[in-house]
Amino acid sequence: MRRRSLAAVAFAVSAGVVAALLTGTAAAANDPGAAKANSRWLATKLKPDGTLENPNGGALPDHGLMLDVLFALYASGDGAKAEPIMKFLDDEGHASDYFTWDGLVPGAGYDKVIVGGSLAKTLVAAQVSSRDPRNVDGYDLVAETHAAIMRKGPDKGRISDYSKDPDLAGAVNNDANSFGQALGVIGLAAAGENDRIAIDRLLTQQCSEGYFRLVFEYMPTKETGDHVTPDGRKVSTCDEGKPLGLSPTDGDATGLGLSALLAARKAGATGLDAPIAKTVSWLKANQTPGGGWGGGVSTEAPNTNSTGMIVQALADAGGADAAVDKGVRYLKSAQATAADSGTKLAGELGAIAYNPASYEAARASGISGADTWIRAGAQASLGLSQIGFYALAKGETQPPAGGTPAPTTTTITKSMTPPRPKKAGTTRASTVVQSPATIAAPDTATPAARLGAYLANRLVGGDHVEVTEDGKTYVDYDATADVVLALRALDQQPDSVVRASQFLLKPEAVQAYAHGAPYEQGEASYAGPLAKLVLVAEFAKADVAGQLRADLVKLRGTGGEFTDTGSFADADETVERHAWAVLATAADPGPAVELLLSRQCADGTFPKHLDTVECGSGDLAATAAAVTALAAGPHTDAAPPSRRPDGWSERRVSAFVSAVGALGVRPTGEGVVTGEGGEPDVALSAAVAAARQTAGLDASGTARSLGKLVRADGGLAKGSAGETDFPASLAAAQGVAGRSWLTAADSPLSPAIRLPLTEANPSAAPVLAAEQSDSPPSWLIWGLAGLAVLLLLTVIALVFVLRRFTKKKGATP
């Protein structure tokens, strides 16, 4: 979906109605959703050992491209996907193959030959991946980078290719260029060790117009001194090289040079304001009408590779919002999206071509030359994430403040109010207003893709759900939050997820949804909305998550209950509401879990209402919510164990196992819960399937069954008949996906345990193990057992009748 957005909603209270005037002015926009889509694609191109083949051949992998991919993955927040790269370089000792000659000719003493640019790039990669830069593959990369800066001679200040062994010095040509120089400046700045002569040497590569050239070019000179070679040459400055044709413009070198100057300034270097301003001005003036930039010699035409690096630097510099936004649109015009599912790019979601023309060609004929797409995507993605290199190296990977979708310049006026919080956190019964923008899903798309498009189309302006009641239109914040989590579970429509998340996390939206503005006259807080906002914020890696959680914890009593405050407080304290609050405070749930456990019914289910102290049998939806809450813990990349997790009581394990077992009673063999009349209950089927999947059980049957119910318009009905229903479609998402949002990509939580158990509560393991094996499903086993009992009773009855009949005939027993 191409970016179209609205400005911040400004609420003005008038006679109980809040009129919203949506206006816009140009503002720069990052697109982390598009960056993440590209990261997912890039990660699939890595070999299991984290390497990429070198297109030029040879035994060594393409180390430089691997590090470009690493930068992109960390910038998008997907650093875990890059761990195999650093494991290969650091843990397995291959980093020195890249920044020395030892990998080319092992054991010949060439480990003493240092490749300056590769060394600097490895330093930055170590910092970005939170490795110790002073001990990578046995090297102190910070010290090595300082040592690669020549302190005298013609190359003074230059991060150089050189030999530590004087006997090999004659074999080494110093081919280090501005890329390596800039990366060295960035790496040393991030280490807190600016090296001024390296910064000053980089500045000599900037021409007076503001651009940087790539190559340190020598020129004849009559000057004398240490800076002159024995044959009468010196390294020219950029301006000196122009009359000799030695200083062509280079967009890539200019973008990275700007990043380096920004890093040095942030680390305390002075005198860089004017060079930075000149660079920004030159880049803005040399953006093509289509929004892209070109690179250097042979890559002068606009391309995504150069544009991504430049957009990243301009976003970091500030003051170029319009150019950045235009650059983002150019990058996205060459990216494969869900709209390409009916083309040859199907299955390549997130991939970025070298230019829009290559993208269009690939729609018809597919990707040819994946290496070009990897190179383009790795740097293009930086322009979508817009995390500056200095912040990236310092581990500060949150999107820049104000990184919201760029609004259009249209003005829309409508009557819009925050929903009156009659019961905070519940969806209002109302008519959903369809978004004016339409996201198409081809008929050949998967059920999940079609449902994702349907849900995204319910977002008015692409970022929120609206409802109509009594002739007035309102924002339905709760439904908007549910759409975000549903799309997370489906792994669909990343643009819509980002935009709706940003809408929900705006201060005015938080005040309306979680605190009842403008209806509440005093302070008010609602646990359900706060819990959902915490999870939305954690998915988005937004700083506001901490404050939202703190506000939620304030509502937790000593007994573990979460009590709303305010005139419109939710007095209907359900188990589902409590489960949301437990999930949002999973890192420190306090007594909330014990309170939940104390409400479990005799048959393992949970009641609908938290104030139910004793019960024989409870509610299936509440039980599904309780299972999800009990299973969750803070996210970890490790697989959930099949034994009792640390910190879990035996009571929690037993309650969890019995509750999961209770969820297996109602579904049919197709994984569907049926209601009255045998009609499938879409919402309940999805809730049960999601909870069982968090427990490690298979939910594919539900996904297949509900997938068949997805209609041509992408939605579902409440049962198998009737009109498409938005609430039912929204509730069905986890079932159609066959998984909970808890196990979705980038989830802030993950299951802390999976069934069947191997140690704790082993008595329950055989029952649940049957569901994981090839044994007949439990419904069939119980059905056959029932049939056997019926046959046995029939036989007994026949024997009884025959005995009475023979006695009447005078026969002996």
Image: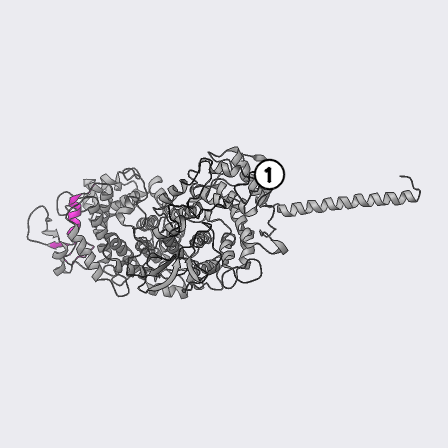
Mark 1 Cα-neighbour bin, 10 Å: few <14, some 14–19, many ≥20: few
Residue depicted at 28% across the width and 45% down the height: 393
Location of residue 480 (image quadrant): bottom left
Quadrant in which the C terminus appears: top right
Q: Position of residue 525 (x, y in %)?
A: 40, 45
Magenta segment: does it hold 194?
yes
Magenta segment: does it hold 433?
no
Residue depicted at 36% across the width and 42% down the height: 87
Colouring convention used in this rendered image of the protein: one colour
Q: Where is residue 485 in the image (x, y as percent from the top left)?
A: 44, 51
Q: Residue tagged by mark 1?
A: 602
- Is 73 placed above or below 146 here? below
In screen coordinates, is 432 left or right of 371? right
- Is 26 placed above or below 587 here? below
Q: Position of residue 160 (x, y in %)?
A: 20, 46
Q: What residue type is labelled 1?
A: Ala
Q: Between residue 742 and residue 251, name the one nearer to us.
A: 742
- Is 28 placed above or below 591 here? below
Residue depicted at 37% across the width and 54% down the height: 503
**Which residue in the rendered view is the most extreme toward the front?**
15
- Is 443 placed above or below 183 here? below
The residue range painted magenta reads 193-219
